[in-house]
Amino acid sequence: MALAGFALVALSGSIAPALAEVTTETVAAPAVASAAATSNAELPRFVPSTDTAAASIVPFQEAVVQPLPTEEEARDIGGGVASWYGREFEGRRTASGERFDPDEYTAAHRTLPFGSKVRVSRNGHSVVVRINDRGPFHGNRVIDLSQAAAEDLGIRSAGSGRVELAVLGND
């Protein structure tokens, strides 16, 4: 923030002399002249192409569905204790800017980029969460899970539990 303020002050010092030279005559004259010189007859017209190569271009392309990353594309990043957060934070903004929804499979991690997909495993069960927040900020916790993810892994009632983490894809 301080850097942005410094840049603004530096720019305003170099722009002020240029703004002092601008008068109403230099601003209004070109606009009036260009408006007077342009008439409807001079405006470009759209003419459809008769080129057959251009006609073969598809105007709308369907979304390409990407398959989920395979186990071979997963990169283990260790494990530790996971905790969870739920309804008391519903609707609040996460560090990524989106609103928290405890029913989505999301999580908070200290360093992984927002949008990273992480496989969280515990006792033979796994869920895939998307990183959209920063944390956890207490204890030796490695990840904060949404309520839905914690429920599926069986750590909601306990409050926390040991998990293994793997980043999916080419992150």
Image (cartoon, rainbow, N blue to C red):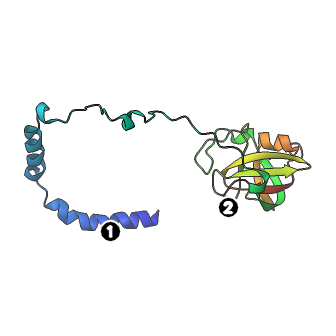
Rate crowding at label 1 as few (under 14), some (14 to 19) or many (20 or more) other CA atoms within 10 Å. few
Q: Residue reaching furthest front?
A: 52
Q: Is residue 61 left or right of residue 119?
A: left
Residue type of the residue flagged with mark 1: Ala
Q: Is residue 77 left or right of residue 13?
A: right
In this view, 29 is above or below 81 = above
Residue at (82, 53) in percent of width and height: 82
Kindly report which numbered mark, 1 or 2, lies closer to the viewer in this rendering. Answer: 2
Residue at (10, 53) in percent of width and height: 26
Q: Position of residue 4 (x, y in %)?
A: 42, 63
C-alpha span from label 1 to label 2: 33 Å
In this view, 114 is above or below 15 = above
Rate crowding at label 2 as few (under 14), some (14 to 19) or many (20 or more) other CA atoms within 10 Å. few
Q: Secondary structure at mark 2?
A: loop
Q: Is residue 69 visible?
A: yes
Residue at (67, 61) in percent of width and height: 111
Please give the residue where the numbered disc 1 appears in the rendered image.
Answer: 10
Q: Secondary structure at mark 1?
A: helix
Residue at (78, 47) in percent of width and height: 84
Report the disc number at residue 111: 2
